[in-house]
Image (cartoon, rainbow, N blue to C red):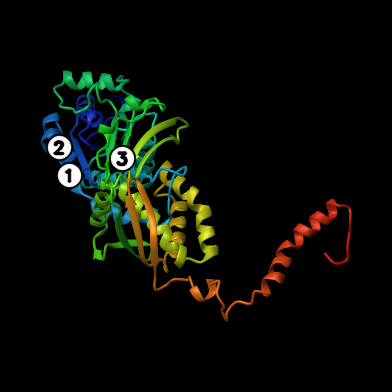
Amino acid sequence: MSEKVNKIVLAYSGGLDTSVILKWLIKTYDCPVIAFVADIGQGEELDGLREKGLDTGAEKVVIEDLKEAFVRDYVFPAFRANAIYEGHYLLGTSLARPLIAKRQIEIAQAEGADAVSHGATGKGNDQVRFELAYQALAPDIKIIAPWRIWNLSSRQSLMDYARDHGIRVVATQEKPYSTDRNLLHVSYEGGILEDPWVSPPEDMFTISASPREAPDKPEVVEITFEQGDPVAVNGERLSPAELLARLNILGGRNGIGRVDLVENRFVGIKSRGVYETPGGTMLRVAHMAIESITMDREVMHLRDSLVPKYAELVYYGFWFSPEMKVLQGMIDETQETVSGTVRLELYKGNCRVLGRKSDTSLYRSDFATFEADQVYRQQDAEGFIRLNALRLRIQALIKQGRKGPDA
């Protein structure tokens, strides 16, 4: 390569792509490479990663537990916004990338590295997410995206490279799909999933039971919120990461949160993805339920009008943009009164609200009742309706070719 690089920090997962990239970077740039692993809830996928990275040639393998930061600083802010991309995707991968990129830059600065690298392909969203974050946080850092410059062109060619260089990988021809796991979700794409007509195999799923095999008895769960953030499950206060992990267990065993969709990537390609997001699905349902009794109508409608834009910014990778900062600040202000408890019923893939209560509730039974009350004069509704209908009546009169002094 023409550009001289002294040291590289690689976002490393130990999967097929980044295992091959680690070796390729060392051979291509002839410089030390630090493999950085962000523990954001991959579970057993972290087993043996340090040894594997060192065996593949890394100068150092840095593994950091970022689970609490991930849920507290990225997942919860997005769920305060009820963010969802194209009506289905709860942004599990999208929310993880800015955290990984931020910590990767910090490690590069601490280690004296002048370059960072990632394993995202030239067709996907992750290349954009990583690199927008890199440039927002360290505009002079060198960025190496192997998929855009090497001559390896398929997962099969990567498996061949790994075999030729003695790199241990778990991808096989029988199960060639790609997975990404963190505390919010598990995603699956590629390989056998590239045909959107083909159903995903049942043995692919990791953290959720099939709704058909889920328990025959409903399970009731209570989630407590404070200023828009969940703080307790069934009365037990938990840290952000502990709470999401608990909900993943509860929702997963009841078959909650499976989604199979075709989404529009930022680069212009449609992509089929299959997701498991049990805890996140429960949180969104519960959060919307507690908002329904604690948030002002016009504030809610204004916030809801901005949800597609918010989700798009997250999905496209603009987490560190000025517009994202403005949006998040506004959304957080809407959550000041969003506190209380929601009761959910989990049953064979369904998550249903059974009840909600709050000390800051705007719901007043003495106003809403169909029985006799002293706070609402039903006669007032006539003038309210006539005023709101005025412009409609004027249009109708014009269409009919009539004019009248009293519209």
Considering the image in quadrants, where does the C terminus appear? bottom right
Name the residue tied to disc 3: 212
- Residue 233: where, in percent of width, then height? 27, 61
Q: Specify the amino acid type for callout 1.
A: Ile
Within 10 Å of the Cα at label 3, are there few (<14), some (14-19), or many (20+) other Cα atoms? Answer: few
Report the residue at 70% width, 66% height from top: 385
Nearest the eye: 97 or 246: 246
Which one is nearer the viewer's eye here, 367 or 40? Answer: 367
Q: Which residue is mark 1?
A: 63
Specify few, some or many for label 1: CA neighbours under 10 Å numbering under 14, 14-19, or 20 or more.
Answer: some
Residue 282 location (% of width, % of height): 35, 53
Which type of secondary structure does the marked residue at label 3 adopt? Answer: loop
Q: Nearer the viewer, mark 2 or mark 3?
A: 3
Q: Amino acid type of disc 2?
A: Leu
Q: Position of residue 314 (x, y in %)?
A: 41, 46
Is 366 above or below relative to 56? below
| Residue contact between numbered discs 1 and 2, judged by CB atoms under 8 Å | yes
Mark 2 or mark 1, which is nearer the start of the sequence? 2
Element carrying mark 2: helix
Identify residue type, mark 3: Arg
- Give the quadrant of the N terminus: top left
- The residue at which mark 2 appears reads as 49
Residue at 39% x, 68% y is 357
**Lower sequence index among marks 3 and 1:** 1
CA gap, disc 1 and disc 2? 9 Å
